[in-house]
Image (cartoon, helix red, strand yellow):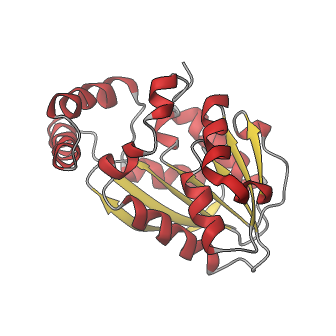
Amino acid sequence: MIPFSDPDSVARYAEGPIRQVPGFLALQQMTRLLLAERIRDDGHVLVLGAGGGLELKAFAEAQRGWCFCGVDPSPEMLALAERTLGPLASRVDLCQGYINSAPPGPFDAATCLLTLHFIPEEERRRTLTEIHRRLKPGAPLVVAHHSFPQQDGEKAKWLARYAAFAAASGVPASNAESAIAAISERLPLLSPEQDEALLREAGFADVALFYAAFTFRGWVAYKA
């Protein structure tokens, strides 16, 4: 099943990241600031995993000259993104599919937030390579997703911390505990070292960690 294709999951999507991702709003703000270091006021930004429209709305409200291409495999989530954006949707092209469905660009920047952890390693490598191909030289890419030590003892410890944060943020404790098994069993998780290596293998340089929050990591990197 495509992530977030279930109507109930889509309806509850907006409340999830705030409760489950430490510093979620700050992550969006930091991402925008990192992009703004390199791109002009009329920048064109590729947003992969754009369904729901939360980061698209945050970016569009803060940078009134930017336009966007938002790509997501879920038509339900893209419909939610359009509703979330409201009048801002006039500056966003929404595209159903995966990275192959994205226009060739070249784009001034790209983001992929809370998405790559759904993608197996080989496909993740290909996805990053295809993002790289669609960027202008020197363009920034910002990614953030689950990425933490995968040794048995370390993995369990960090997942427990993830669940504790979710429970402290209002997620029912039983749901938070269930999420540990779901993440561990269903997501093709990688370590931070593996994630950094994939970015470099895809052609990105100056890979730098800017965000670390329990099980989540975020990097900024640039097309060499």
Query: Residue 223: horizontal and vertical position, in percent?
Result: 69, 65
Q: Quadrant of the N terminus?
A: top right
The residue located at (52%, 24%) in the rendering is: 7
- In the image, 18 versus 152, the foreground residue is 18
Query: Residue 53: horizontal and vertical position, in percent?
Result: 60, 49
Give above or below for 27 relative to 65: above
**Is residue 199 found left or right of 46 in the rendered image?**
left
The residue located at (44%, 59%) in the rendering is: 218
Q: Is residue 57 at all visible to an observer of this figure?
A: yes
The answer to which quarter of the image holds residue 190 is: top left
Number of numbered discs visible in the structure rendering? 0
**Is residue 107 found left or right of 16 in the rendered image?**
right
- In the image, 51 versus 48, the foreground residue is 51
**Is residue 182 found left or right of 6 in the rendered image?**
left
The answer to which quarter of the image holds residue 92 is: bottom right
Q: Is residue 222 at all visible to an observer of this figure?
A: no
Query: Residue 38: horizontal and vertical position, in percent?
Result: 67, 79
Q: Quadrant of the C terminus?
A: bottom right
The residue located at (27%, 46%) in the rendering is: 149
The residue located at (30%, 57%) in the rendering is: 22
- In the image, 13 versus 1, the foreground residue is 13
Give above or below for 114 relative to 218: above
